[in-house]
Amino acid sequence: MDWAGWALFGLVATAALTAALIAAQLAGLTRLDLPLVLGTLVTEDPDRARVIGFFIHLCAGQGFALGYAATFALLNRATWWIGALFGILHVAIALTVLLPLLPGVHPRMASLRAGPASTAVLEPPGLFALNYGVQTPAVTAVVHVMYGVVLGLLLSAD
C-alpha cells in the first residue's frame, strides 16, 4: 500500500468528486450545492461559504481517503472495483444518515418540522437528498463511486 501517496491521491479523488458534483449542479442535474451547504455551517455569506465549504469538503475527503487506504491495507489489495464498492457504501451512508441528520446541527438549514417562523436559508436535504431534485441520489452515487474508483486505481499503482 502506498502510504506516502494516500494524501495526494485523496486530494485528487476529492477534487474530482467535488468538480463533478459542481458540474452536475451547473448542468441542472441537481440543486445540491455541497460547498454552500458545508460553508454555511460557519458563515452566512454565500460567496465566502462556497469557498470555505470547498475546503471543508477537501478536508473531509482526506479523512475518507485515509479510511479507504487503511481498509485497502487491511485487505492487502486495492483495485478499482473494491474502490467502487467502498464508494457505494460511502454514498449510502451519506444519503441515508449524514445528510438527513444535517438539519439537526446546521445553524442555517431548516428542518422538516420548521414552521413559518424559521429564519433558515437552506432547504433540508431529506432522505436520499431528494429535496434537491430527483436526480440528486444518482448524481451523488456516481461521483462517490468515481471517488472510490480513483482511489482504488491510484493506491493499487504502487
Image (cartoon, rainbow, N blue to C red):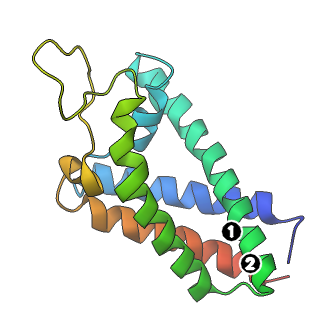
Residue at left 66%, top 79%? 152
In front: 62, or 111? 111
Eyeballing the image, is 45 above or below 14?
A: above
Q: Secondary structure at mark 1?
A: helix
Q: Residues within 10 Å of mark 2 (few under 14, many from 20)?
A: many
In the image: residue 67, left or right of residue 38: right
In the image: residue 61, left or right of residue 144: right
Disc 2 from disc 1: Cα separation: 6 Å
Instruction: Give the number of callouts.
Output: 2
Q: Residues within 10 Å of mark 1 (few under 14, many from 20)?
A: many
Residue 149 lies in quadrant: bottom right
Residue at left 32%, top 57%? 24
Residue 35 lies in quadrant: top left
Residue at left 35%, top 58%? 96
Residue 52 lies in quadrant: top right
State the image coordinates of residue 106 (x, y, percent, origin top left): 40, 28
Q: Amino acid at mark 1?
A: Tyr
Q: Secondary structure at mark 2?
A: helix
**Res 68 label:** 1
Which residue carries the number 2 mark? Answer: 72
State the image coordinates of residue 91 (x, y, percent, origin top left): 44, 64
State the image coordinates of residue 90 (x, y, percent, origin top left): 50, 65
Is residue 82 in view from this perspective? Answer: yes
Quadrant location of the C terminus?
A: bottom right
State the image coordinates of residue 51 (x, y, percent, origin top left): 52, 31
**Res 15 label:** none
In the image: residue 29, left or right of residue 82: left
Q: Give yes or no for contact between labels 2 and 1 (Cβ–Cβ under 8 Å).
A: yes
Q: Amino acid at mark 2?
A: Phe
Residue at left 48%, top 22%? 48
